[in-house]
Image (cartoon, grey):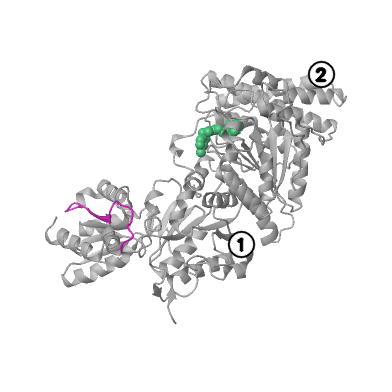
Amino acid sequence: MSQKTSVSSDQSTAKPLAAGRHGERISTLISSKRAKIDRQIGLELFRDMTLGRRFEDKCAEMYYRGKMFGFVHLYNGQEAVSTGVIGAMKRQHDWFCSTYRDHVHALSAGVPAREVMSELFGKETGCSKGRGGSMHLFSQEHHLLGGFAFIGEGIPIALGAAFTSRYKRDALGDASSNAVTAAFFGDGTCNNGQFFECLNMAQLWQLPILFVVENNKWAIGMAHERATSEPEIWQKAAAFGMAGEEVDGMDVLAVRAATQRAIKRARAGEGPTLLECLTYRFRGHSLADPDELRAEEEKQFWAKRDPIKALEKDLTSDSLVRADELRAIEKEIDAEINDCVEFALAAAEPNPKELTRYIWAED
Amino acid sequence: MAGTLLFNALRDAIDEEMARDSLVCVMGEDVGQYGGSYKVTKDLYEKYGELRVLDTPIAENSFTGMAVGAAMTGLRPIVEGMNMGFLLLAFNQISNNMGMLRYTSGGNFTIPTVVRGPGGVGRQLGAEHSQRLEAYFHAVPGIKIVACSTPTNAKGLMKAAIRDNNPVLFFEHVLLYNLIEELPEGDYVCALDQADLVREGKDVTILTYSRMRQHCLKAVEQLETDGIDVELIDLISLKPFDMETIVRSIRKTHRVIVVEECMKTGGIGAELIALITEQCFDELDARPIRLSSQDIPTPYNGKLENFTIIQPHQIVEAAQQIVLKGL
Ligand SMILES: Cc1ncc(C[n+]2csc(CCOP(=O)(O)OP(=O)(O)O)c2C)c(N)n1
Ligand SMILES: [Mg+2]
């Protein structure tokens, strides 16, 4: 069932790369089936990725200016995954489940930047009413099941959402119930029991779920190869009889195409997919991370694969859009981000009288 | 009409609620084809099908989390812990997501779930199968904890738990499944947050729950012959406590004994007595007494096991001491 879209690298002949095996894998990966897009989609993808990137840059600025507290994990470098996956799904219909690195997934899912930034500032206007914070973004309206801060714990939650889709279709006879759930998590998380347990159940019950691994090679300071016996995560799908695929996670069109294939299967009742996206984070693990372990050459290797620049190149060389159109989008986004910061700064804090509200369903 | 066994009372409650609301479903190990390890879901698989009565792999944390995700997206799952002790493996999902997620999400999601199953010290089941997780879970915010103790309240509480929009941890007891009783007719529901005033009395208040209710009833019989008039209250709700009923009783008797099956340290009684001291210290004529299990893993040997948990004669002695000697 598993389909391999890469050419496996021969260790003995491969040129040793500063980026190690992770870098080797992406260098030899052939993304044969990239998504075909029109001008409109191209602009949307560029807008979503740029919003994600610039939002995160603003977060770093605000964090260092003391407007934001706690652990803040930025997504820079991984934008092609959020945009590629969520952009290929139906917002407010399909479900999305994230981790502590959740700002950009929330934005891609359609949570307004004002609500996300407000949440990071701990304001009442935040998507979690200032009770959640950076690692706990939620939006029922936008089908964001949450940011989950413990490793792996979001995967069973996503499985539950996928179970509901099947339950509504097959136990309640609602033929229109075809929502698919995408669960995002990292390479380090794939060594946790909940990952394996849920892969098993998802395949066993043919649930409409997409397991999206954002393999950025690092789990804080633990390099992927040092943590796992089989670094090719997508191959683990085969142990469950599940479809697995590896994809260039710096190429939004490759991610989009792989997602479209998976979603098509899931909606048709043909079960889950494990999608391993090879990617890299351009910043430290969190804004508190001194980032001392990752080699400069490795960072440069990946910086050359900046997914937003890659998309721009695709769009302009195909003459789908002009560079000045993209610059105009960037300007709009800068305005949107300034607006969300102003909005969040001016917003009210939660009322201390409501400290114990939201514990119970009735309140 | 013949009586109903407690496990069948629970089964009837689940059956009736599943018939009433198609969003109610059951998931857990051997709940389907096998009918549940204590037969609480017997025949429901045949009646409602494999999705509504879902046999899960042995993956407690993941299927409990799955229930949370299903509840967030509209279902009303009942999770069976084959033995409540196994839910130690689901501690993370119960605490972080079942209990805290509604708050953390600023009210975005509600988690209407019931987690139920057998707990308590049985007959020589060994330490791991004899746990009282109600005490371990007591500190988790956002969950209600109840313990049933008779066929009648088992059914009424189970129905209430299923209809409640909050997560409810529902403790059954391995040694109570075969209690038999005639149930009230028709569709009745018991309040999840109300203690049961089992026997009115004026000399001493005994607070207990789950199987220890049986031990207390035995002690009460003996104490009656001694002329000691016990007010016996079954807590039912372990979180939150029904402090109104409890304080009202203590205002009358001025003496209180807590009888529990959990261990003493960090137990239910520890919290209960702290609250009683805070709320009605001046009403007490004697120091509160706590009768709890020893702070040890439950030993296999039958004699040692009996020494580990409270026996009726210890309740009698404590009541005599507090009422007759005022100690
Ligand atoms: C249960 C648990 N253990 C440890 C941590 C601390 N922790 C936070 S992120 C992280 C690394 C995760 O790496 P990965 O899954 O690759 O995701 P990434 O951060 O790279 O996106 C660890 C160990 C945690 N949050 N939860
Ligand atoms: Mg990682």
Horizontal side, residue A290 vs residue A52: left or right? left
Chain label for disc 1: B
Most extreme residue toward the bottom, as rendered? Answer: B1
Residue at label 1?
B52
Question: In which quadrant of the rendered image does the N terminus of chain B lie?
Answer: bottom left
Residue at label 2?
A324
* Coordinates of residue B307 in the picture (x, y in percent): 26, 60
Position above or below: A309 against A96: above
Q: Is residue A131 visible?
A: no
Ligand 1 location (quadrant) = top right
* Coordinates of residue A109 in the picture (x, y in percent): 68, 37
Horizontal side, residue B219 vs residue A87: left or right? left
Of the pair B326 and B42, the residue shown nearer to us: B42
Of the pair A52 and A267, the residue shown nearer to us: A267
Q: Is residue B236 visible?
A: yes
Question: In which quadrant of the rendered image does the C terminus of chain B lie?
Answer: bottom left
> Which residues make up the magenta segment?
B284-301
Cα distance in 3D space between marks 1 and 2:
56 Å
Position above or below: A334 against A180: above
**Numbered circles on residues, count:** 2
Most extreme residue toward the front, as rendered? Answer: A12
Residue drawn at (26%, 69%), measured in percent from left and top?
Answer: B218
